[in-house]
Image (cartoon, rainbow, N blue to C red):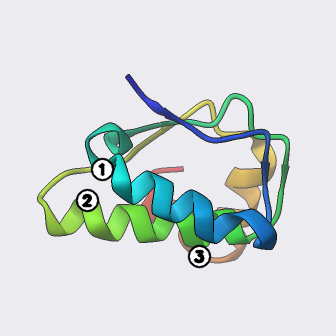
Amino acid sequence: MPFSLPASVTQETATQLEIEGLRNLASLSSIDCSQLKDFDSTVLAVLLAWRKKLHENNQSLLIECAPEKLKVLAKVYGVSTLLGL
């Protein structure tokens, strides 16, 4: 079952979300972004932290249903290839 991002990911919620994801590392191989509506670039930091941890364990990250804004942010920050967006 994929790990679902909440509707909102901001500076105020990013740290807790990152911790929650790392506690559920087995479910992080697939991230469902279908609910993600209100977010800023901190969501990229969370996704990259998860990707790094998965990579250390020889696992990959699959981001599903990424909103267009997330794809654009990833491209602007130069991490779209790392995140598979």
Residue 52 point in image, percent of width and height: 32, 70
Residue at mark 3 to residue at mark 2: CA–CA distance: 20 Å
Residue 49 is drawn in which quadrant?
bottom left
Q: Which amino acid, mark 2?
A: Leu
Q: Residue furthest top?
A: 1
Local secondary structure at mark 2? helix
Q: Which amino acid, mark 3?
A: Gly
Q: Residue furthest right?
A: 38
Query: Depth-wise, is mark 1 or mark 3 nearer the camera?
Result: 1
Residue 85 point in image, percent of width and height: 54, 50
In depth, the one of 82 and 52 nearer the eye is: 52
Disc nearer the start of the sequence (1/3):
1
Local secondary structure at mark 3? loop
Q: Which residue is mark 3?
A: 78
Q: Please say if the residues under marks 1 and 2 sit with CB atoms less than 8 Å apart.
A: yes
Observer able to see residue 75 = no
Q: Which amino acid, mark 1?
A: Leu
Query: Depth-wise, is mark 1 or mark 2 nearer the camera?
Result: 1
Disc nearer the start of the sequence (3/2):
2
User: For residue 54, which numbered disc appears in the image?
Assistant: 2
2 lies above or below 72 = above
Residue 54 is drawn in which quadrant?
bottom left
Name the residue rendered at 75%, 58% in the picture: 72
Residue at mark 1 to residue at mark 2: CA–CA distance: 8 Å
Residue 42 is drawn in which quadrant?
bottom right
Q: Which residue is mark 1?
A: 25
Residue 36 point in image, percent of width and height: 75, 40
78 lies above or below 2 = below
